[in-house]
Amino acid sequence: MLEGKTAVVTGASRGIGQAIALQMAANGADLAIIYAGGSEAAEEACVKAAGLGVSARAYKCDVSDFEQAKAASEGILSDFGSVDILVNNAGIIKDNLLLRMSEADFDAVLGVNLKGAFNMTKHLARSIMRSPAGRIINISSVSGLMGNPGQANYAAAKAGLVGLTKTVAKELAGKGVTCNAIAPGFIETAMTAALPASVIEYIDTSVPLKRIGSVADVANLAVFLASDQASYITGEVIKVDGGMYI
């Protein structure tokens, strides 16, 4: 489905990002894996991707830093020659109630989750525009659509991604590039592994499908949006939330 294409996935050393990267590799895409922390998980992801028969390389980068994002993008283009798909998945959380939230925590979350997507899109857009099937996929959240107590920073960043998605979709449509967003709800990752009982009860009572989602649920949609099958879909925000926010 993605043979002959190169995909860049940020925050791809774990969780949803790694699932997206490996599902794209399973569908034939070569991979550039962007990570910010330790290299071991990123290198393991590259080994797994190589086992699927594609080329994969890891690049350490704080996507919130404009110059680091530029350097990583230049390295990717030097190594792979071109980029067809960009998945802006990198994200952090620093939850607190608004009255207790520090300026630093607000800025840090917007820096990675929103400005990081701007930085990577800006630095790779020209290559993606030259692709015969350029795709940009931003990982937002239902928190950005409905708000969530204790997540003023995270919800603001994810809502900002929606606006960024729609604007990029309009600006790059003339070059055949599509830009869409995925808004996950509760997804089973290391981040959600320690959810309190009250949240589990909320899922059971308030999510129509009455279960937490899997990373594969998000990854499968990302692969579809990156494929030729989704060539006439752009500017959309698609929820993967079990019906939590209808």
Image: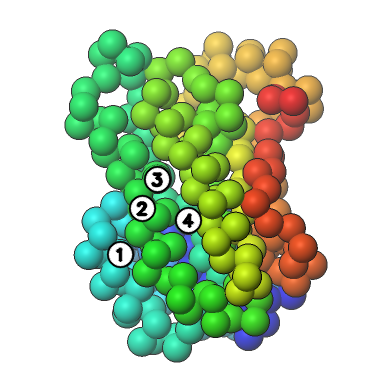
Labels 1 and 3 touching (C-beta < 8 A): no
Q: Is residue 197 above or below residue 137?
A: above
Front-lying residue, 171 or 136: 171
- The residue located at (53%, 57%) in the rendering is 168
Alpha carbon of mark 4 to alpha carbon of mark 3: how far?
9 Å
Residue marked by disc 4: 88
Numbered mark located on residue 69 in the image: 1
Residue marked by disc 3: 114
Numbered mark located on residue 58 in the image: none
Disc 1 is placed on an element classified as helix
> Residue 6: in sight, yes or no?
no
Looking at the rendering, which quadrant does residue 219 occupy?
bottom right
- The residue located at (65%, 44%) in the rendering is 237
Alpha carbon of mark 1 to alpha carbon of mark 3: how far?
13 Å
| Residue type (three-letter) at the residue carrying disc 3 | Leu
| Residue type (three-letter) at the residue carrying disc 4 | Asn
Disc 3 is placed on an element classified as helix
Alpha carbon of mark 2 to alpha carbon of mark 3: how far?
5 Å
* Quadrant of the snapshot with the N terminus: bottom right
